[in-house]
Amino acid sequence: MKLLNYTTRYFAIILLVLLSVWAVLFYFEMLDEIYDSMDDGLENQKMLVIRRAKEDAAILEKNEFGEGYYTINKVELENVQNLKDNYRDTLMYMQNEEDFEPVRLLESVFQQNGEYYKLKVITSMVEEDDLIEDLLYSLLWLYLGLIFSIILLNNIVLKEVWNPFYKLISELKNFNIEKDENIKVEKTSIEEFNLLNKQIQQLLQKSKDSFTGQKQFIENASHELQTPLAISINKLELYIENNELNEDELKQIAAVLNNLERLTRFNKSLLLLSKIENQQFVAEERVSINTIIENLVDDFSDFSRHKNMEVAMDLKEAIEFKMNKDLAIILFTNLIKNAIVHGESGSKIEIKTDNSIVNISNFSENKELKKEKLFTRLYKIRDKNSNGLGLAISKAIADEYNLALSYHFDEKHIFKVGFPKK
């Protein structure tokens, strides 16, 4: 869901920034409108007071606010030459509130009968403050409502829109080309997703057809090669028995037989690998891994003694697993034989079972092996008459039963087979 989370996050951030800017600008614009309205009212009151002063000179003597909203004080010309209309906020004691309340004040100067007078006109800001406060709370609630709507929209609508994409990703993660299965795509009204589904299905179908064709070719070729190889080996053996050959001729024919034997083993390994991938080993039973290892170590005892190698077993945990017994034998035969073949003469091989894991380790002249190639077909560690398929077969068996086959190097070569815990 990373793409959706990033989309939601950035979309929400951009909208929040825009909303924040809009809310601040709107708030200050409304403040300006309120102050403009109040100043226009004060200007109108000033004009009314000046008009009344011309009609009634007694008004010019009103120099206290008292119960009125204006005062008039006589001033000298030099004190008002540069005085312009001045609007400002101030506090004034209100009798009815018995406290200081904010007011808007206009100071102005006018002339009458050759004399100059300073006029102060006030208007209460109490209602305006309440209006500003209400406006602020209204904007705040609107802002929070929009934020909630954006989050809700992103988490519901966008998830619904991207749902087919993430289902397709999930299907691709679980797809295994070795199993004859198709991915399930969800129908959607989004044209781009439908096009993506179609192209992926076509691509996977081509890959499956190519993989199937490759497996069938290997299997057919292996089957076809078995008979001529067996005939060739038998005829060469009969030829040796029925003819008196010198030492040089015997060496040459022995070399041919050796190559034919290697080709036969290679052919059988390819056929076995093809059968494993085609899931032709159907029969399964509860297999004792410890028993298989003990029997294989006993079978390889002559080989290990020939190389002056000790095989130490520490099977402190009994591991049982449901699988095809023949494949289990092949899996550990390849791993144990690999440890003996590539181990140093006179060294020690250790086989341990612990925490549902089988560890097979050996010392070798080789340094750390290439993990990315180790379990691939035809990869040979050293020229030991190997066909390069042993570890590939082991990997195929492990994948078939979801076993964790891995390799790492820690002063010695260690192969691990992890069995699923109960």
Image (cartoon, helix red, strand yellow):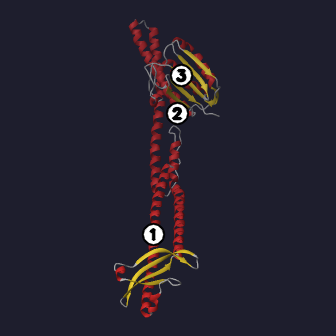
- Residue 361: mark in rendering: 3
Q: Quadrant of the C terminus?
A: top right
Q: Position of residue 147 (x, y in %)?
A: 52, 61
Q: Amino acid at mark 1?
A: Phe
Across and down, in percent, residue 139 comes to: 51, 68
Q: In the rendered view, would you say 117 is above or below 274? A: below
Residue 275 visible? The answer is: no
Q: 37 and 342: which one is in front?
A: 37
Label 3's element? Answer: strand
Mark 1 Cα shell of 10 Å, populated few (<14), some (14-19), many (≥20)? few
Nearest the viewer among 190 and 77 is 77
10 Å crowding of disc 2: few (<14), some (14-19), many (20+) = some
Percent of width and height locating residue 380: 44, 24
What's the CA distance linking mark 2 and mark 3? Answer: 27 Å
| Above or below, comparing residue 149 to residue 227 in the picture | below
Determine the CA span between mark 1 and mark 2. Answer: 73 Å
- Left or right? Give the position of 382 relative to 153: left
Q: Are marks 2 and 3 in contact (CB under 8 Å)?
A: no
Label pair 1/3, CB-CB below 8 angstroms? no
SS assignment at label 2:
helix
Secondary structure found at label 1: helix
The image's mark for residue 277 is 2
What residue appears at the point 45 percent right and 34 percent down from the top-left corner? 214
Few, some or many C-alpha atoms within 10 Å of disc 3 (few <14, some 14-19, many ≥20)?
A: many
On the rendered structure, is 157 left or right of 314?
A: left
Q: Which mark is residue 28?
A: 1
Amino acid type, mark 3: Ser
Judge whether residue 108 can be spotted in this image: yes
Q: How many marks?
A: 3
Residue 128: percent from left, percent from top: 51, 75
| Discs 1/3, front | 1
Q: Nearer the viewer, residue 226 or 281?
A: 281
